[in-house]
């Protein structure tokens, strides 16, 4: 658990076959929260939600790949909440059973239909907190990041020391690099980056040292 701001609490739960980071975002005052990504092991996520006494008001995806949605069906039933994704990832979402079989050889059910769509500039209210949606295509057409007080949740767009892959369906390397350089790197240097896999980092660290998009990085020519 990490207290990021006066009221913002972030709890990371690493789940599923690809160690996906699911994040519980909690307003410490109202005890309302949201879940960013739901990569599997719904019981593990639920135990953390209940430990904190959080009322989850929605599940918000960073993108539609199968390893970020495996627990969505169970969680929307258990938590009586809705889930949302960018509309440009609807096709990606529909292909999750095929991708899971192709990449990992596992059989998964199709995800439920989203209850609604998120888009650039949307503001998600969590008790007294606000998260802003930024559209960051590249890893998938509908990849988004969520900007909160002092931090950003980047999904598979930006990692500690790496960037998202673009060799899957809908990937676009030029759009990915543009999303990072023009949107994520415009955030304050002291913002904490919470990625979809692996450890957290900071905007200033990735701007300086990321081997792909940092100073002198491989793709800084875009």
Image (cartoon, helix red, strand yellow):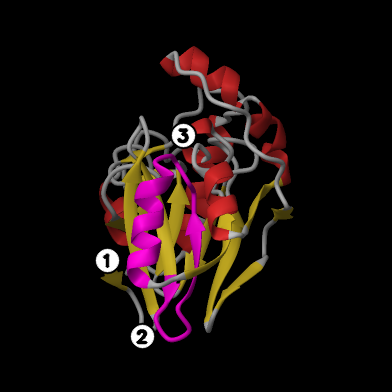
Instruction: Please say if 58 is above or below 137.
Output: below
Q: Secondary structure at mark 2?
A: loop
Residue 96 relative to residue 50: left or right:
right
Dot 3 lies on which element? helix
Furthest residue toward front: 78
Where 82 sits versus 171, above or below?
below
Tell which circle, 2 or 1, labels the residue nearer the N-terminal end. 1
Q: Dot 1 surroundings within 10 Å: few (below 14), some, or many (20 or more)? A: few
Provide the secondary structure element on which disc 1 rests.
loop
Label annotation for residue 215 = none
* Residue identifier under label 3: 67
Q: Looking at the image, which residue is at 39% across and 76% down?
A: 8
Query: Badge 2 is on which residue?
Result: 6
Q: Mark 2 or mark 1, which is nearer to you?
A: 1
Tell me which segment is drawn in magenta: 26-52
Q: Please check the rendered image and state whether residue 39 is part of the magenta-colored stretch, yes or no.
A: yes
Name the residue located 56 percent from the left edge and 37 percent from the top edge.
Answer: 138
Residue topped by disc 1: 1
Marks 3/2 in contact by CB < 8 Å: the verdict is no
x 48%, y 50%: residue = 181
| Magenta-drawn stretch contains 134 | no
């Amino acid at each position: 658990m990490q207290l990021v701001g006066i009221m913002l609490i972030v709890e990371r739960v690493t789940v599923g076959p690809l160690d996906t980071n699911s994040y519980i975002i909690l307003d410490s005052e109202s005890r309302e929260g949201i879940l960013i990504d739901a990569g599997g092991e719904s019981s593990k996520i639920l135990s953390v939600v209940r430990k904190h006494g959080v009322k989850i008001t929605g599940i918000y995806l960073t993108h539609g790949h199968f390893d970020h949605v495996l627990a969505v069906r169970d969680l929307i039933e258990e938590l009586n909440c809705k889930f949302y994704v960018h509309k440009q990832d609807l096709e990606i979402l529909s292909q999750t059973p095929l991708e899971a079989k192709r990449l990992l050889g596992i059989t998964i059910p199709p995800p439920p239909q989203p209850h609604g769509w998120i888009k650039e500039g949307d503001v998600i209210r969590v008790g007294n907190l606000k998260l802003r949606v930024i559209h960051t295509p590249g890893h998938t057409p509908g990849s988004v990041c969520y900007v909160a007080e002092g931090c950003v949740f980047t999904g598979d767009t930006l990692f500690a020391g790496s960037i998202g892959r673009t060799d899957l369906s809908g990937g676009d390397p030029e759009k990915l690099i543009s999303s990072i350089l023009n949107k994520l790197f415009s955030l304050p240097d002291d913002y904490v980056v919470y990625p979809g896999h692996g450890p957290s980092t900071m905007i200033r660290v990735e701007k300086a040292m990321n081997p792909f998009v940092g100073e002198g990085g491989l793709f800084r020519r875009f």
